[in-house]
Amino acid sequence: MSKVLIVGAGGVGSVVVHKCAQVPEVFSEIVLASRTVAKCEAIRDSVRQRTGRDIEVTAVDADNVAAMTALINRVKPALVLNVALPYQDLPIMDACLAAGADYLDTANYEPPDEARFSYTWQWPYHDKFKAQGLMALLGSGFDPGVTNVYCAYAAKHYFDEIHYVDILDANAGDHGHPFATNFNPEINIREVTARGKYWENGQWLETEPLSVKQSFDFPRIGPRNAYLMYHEELESLVKNIKGLKRIRFWMTFSDNYLKHLEVLRNVGMTGITPVEFEGHQIIPLQFLKALLPDPASLGPRTKGKTCIGNVIEGIKDGKPRKIYIYNICDHEECYREVGSQAISYTTGVPAMIGAMMMLTNAWRGQGVFNMEQLDPDPFMAALNRYGLPWEVKEL
Ligand SMILES: NC(=O)c1ccc[n+]([C@@H]2O[C@H](COP(=O)([O-])OP(=O)(O)OC[C@H]3O[C@@H](n4cnc5c(N)ncnc54)[C@H](OP(=O)(O)O)[C@@H]3O)[C@@H](O)[C@H]2O)c1
């Protein structure tokens, strides 16, 4: 029985709160804090209607370490679950250290003025968390998150050595808008327009943005073009999966999405350098975000499935082995259950499960951890139980 403080009332935050509310034996009290309290109230009302449970809501500016620390001191949660934006990771970690609370997030820090997400800012917190006997779990979403745990599970049960990993993320959902992103548009477009990067034979290799593609036949979706991108779990998996020779990340995009993105990029709308407009400094990408549909509004209109998984090759008992481990999630089923589309769902459920692992001491440690450093078995069992069942195919 534990109290949890959830920060961020966006698409992912809404799923996390609904899923925690479904498990009162672990999450006995839930407090939701975000910048705009009206969004917290809408989630509170939906949770009350769907589960009969009441949660506390409050406003906070999580960039303000003193305000965040005061909130943690008042609420006294066992864990702070951060599903605000990556920019808030460091201030919330600082507040957890100041107030003495465990920490969990789903995306690694990136500075607002530089599109470069990396663990290099959060890993150095390891000694500070350890010194206080606290635990921080980084990247407990789907990718990163479940994809890291899939690697740990494969290493534990299927391989003596893992040599090649390809993480493949397909969203075959249709929301009916000409152009929209499935999670925060600013974070999503920064990620997609960055240079591609993968790891092979001990070094990082870079590619032009979205310039390398392969066709992959996704179960229950069919063949789709998947594009090589840099993604944050590669950085930790290279460190933690021993013997790896190559790891890459691929994501599907429709031709329509790519056409819109190319035009927006060509005219400068995806830039993050401020420009002067009629006496105001505006950041083009933030202005674009204001024009695009709110990802949280896509739930009622998105149909189709997502399929995210890992193709893993290596050696078992002296013989080559190749497996595919994956989850399929249906946008409309997610909407029926928690009022959100599958991208928010596939992120929010692992965030709830990561928190459950920590609060029940199934996962315990002192310091800062990535998902693949912990025992995959209880997490994999919980995925099956709480809405993201997985399958393994021998290839
Ligand atoms: N690992 C994965 O698989 C995965 C996948 C998708 C997303 N993610 C991550 O999940 C997180 C949430 O994504 P999302 O799609 O839910 O984004 P979102 O809909 O934009 O929600 C973000 C929420 O954070 C709040 N917020 C922003 N700045 C804040 C601040 N300074 N103080 C307090 N609250 C603040 C926002 O408040 P306002 O409403 O007032 O703006 C908003 O409610 C992001 O970090 C994203 O990168 C991870």
Image (spheres, helix red, strand yellow):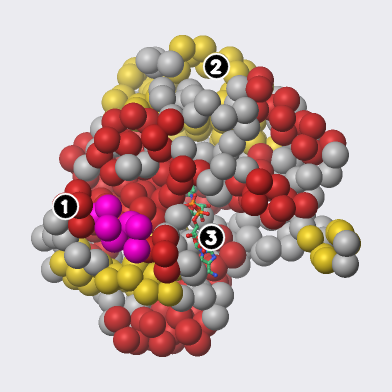
Instruction: Name which of mark 1 and mark 3 comes first in the sequence.
Output: 1
Which percent across, then down, holds residue 265?
Answer: 79, 38
* Dot 2: element: strand
- Amino acid carrying label 2: it is Arg
Front of the two marks 3 and 2 = 3
User: Is residue 215 in view from this perspective?
Assistant: yes
Residue 224: give its label.
2
Q: CA distance from mark 1 to mark 3?
A: 27 Å
Q: CA distance from mark 3 to mark 2?
A: 29 Å
- Amino acid carrying label 1: it is Thr
- Taking 335 as reference, is 24 above or below it? below
Residue appearing at x 37%, y 63% in the figure: 40
Residue 73: give its label.
none
Range of residues picked out in magenta:
41-47
Residue appearing at x 70%, y 37% in the figure: 196
Front of the two marks 2 and 1 = 1
Prevailing secondary structure of the magenta residues: helix
Residue 85: give its label.
3
Tag 1 residue: 51
Q: Residues within 10 Å of mark 2 (few under 14, many from 20)?
A: some
* Dot 1: element: helix
Front of the two marks 1 and 3 = 1
Q: Nearer the viewer, residue 298 or 184?
A: 298
Which percent across, then down, holds residue 216?
Answer: 53, 16
Mark 2 vs ligand 1: CB below 8 Å: no
Q: In this image, 3 relative to 235: left or right?
A: left
Mark 3 vs ligand 1: CB below 8 Å: yes
- Amino acid carrying label 3: it is Leu
User: Is residue 378 in view from this perspective?
Assistant: no
